[in-house]
Image (tube, rainbow, N blue to C red):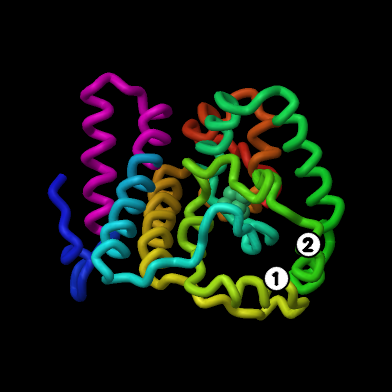
């Protein structure tokens, strides 16, 4: 699929371009004999990679500011993360293949810990507890699911690590961080497309908290199969 940076320029509709690629990729997978259940996850992953490449091109060509985020910096990994069901299913597939039994048990502990600290709390109260709420996928300052991390983690990238540190040290949940507008737009659009696509197919599409969504997948016998049949896999939001 030929694609140019200018396609995202003024007057173009990036979502339409992505939507076309989504349909084409699904069709290709079908022609290759891949069932819809496997194809949808593969295509979502491919579109995330496609969007990643666009962002890298923009930043390499100086058309978007380079972000300050780097390995070991994890201020933003201490807040509640919101994802959509297909992201939870991609994470579940990844951890089922790559995580050991004890690592999955550690995730369960992380889920219980997050729930015990956040259930019934307001946004402001939860924000004030962020130092005690590292993401359950954060280990030694690094993301253990980096290759398939949620779109919000890809889009919420800072242009100034100092603002992240100030927000991390603050109890004011309205503290702002200077984020990359291009990353925000590209990954926000990618996520929105899959949200709409899921909704159109009558699959669960509502935004979920990461720890709750992973918990629901771990508690299900076949989350992807059930989700693609329209069952309610996700109980907690
Ligand atoms: S999923 Fe990864 S990048 Fe996102 S908050 Fe968790 S550790 Fe950080």
Let me know if residue 211 appears in the view. Answer: no
| Front residue (pair 159, 2) | 159
Please state the extent of the stretch shown in magenta in the rendering.
Answer: 16-44
Q: Residue at 65%, 50% (x, y): give it.
A: 141
Q: Main secondary structure of the magenta part?
A: helix
Q: Residue at 81%, 39% (x, y): give it.
A: 109
Asked if marks 2 and 1 touch (Cβ < 8 Å), the reply is: yes
Please give the label number shown on residue 168. Answer: 1
Q: Position of residue 120 (x, y in %)?
A: 84, 61
Name the residue carrying label 2: 131
Gap between marks 2 and 1, in whole Å? 8 Å
Let me know if residue 185 appears in the view. Answer: yes
Residue 19 lies within the magenta run: yes
Question: Would you identify the image quadrant in which residue 77 lies?
Answer: bottom right
Q: Residues within 10 Å of mark 2 (few under 14, many from 20)?
A: some
Q: Residue at 52%, 44% (x, y): give it.
A: 146
């Amino acid at each position: 699929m030929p694609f140019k940076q200018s396609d995202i320029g003024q007057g173009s509709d990036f979502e339409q371009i992505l939507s076309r690629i989504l349909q084409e990729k699904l069709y290709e997978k079908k022609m290759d004999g891949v069932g819809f259940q496997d194809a949808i996850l593969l295509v979502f992953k491919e579109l995330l990679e496609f969007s990643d490449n666009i962002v890298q091109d923009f930043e390499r060509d100086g058309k978007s500011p380079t972000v300050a985020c780097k390995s070991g910096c994890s201020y933003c990994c201490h807040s509640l993360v919101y994802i959509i069901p297909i992201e939870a299913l991609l994470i579940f597939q990844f951890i089922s293949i790559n995580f050991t039994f004890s690592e999955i048990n550690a995730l369960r502990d992380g889920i219980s810990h997050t729930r015990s600290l956040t259930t019934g709390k307001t946004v402001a109260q939860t924000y004030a507890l962020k130092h005690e709420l590292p993401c359950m996928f954060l280990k030694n300052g690094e993301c253990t699911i980096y290759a398939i991390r949620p779109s919000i983690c890809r889009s919420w990238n800072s242009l100034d690590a100092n603002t992240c540190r100030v927000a991390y040290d603050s109890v004011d949940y309205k503290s702002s961080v200077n984020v990359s507008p291009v990353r925000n737009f590209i990954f926000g659009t990618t996520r929105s497309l899959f949200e709409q696509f899921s909704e159109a197919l009558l699959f669960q599409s509502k935004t979920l908290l990461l720890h709750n969504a992973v918990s629901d997948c771990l508690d299900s016998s076949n989350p992807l199969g059930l989700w693609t049949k329209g069952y309610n896999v996700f109980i907690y939001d």
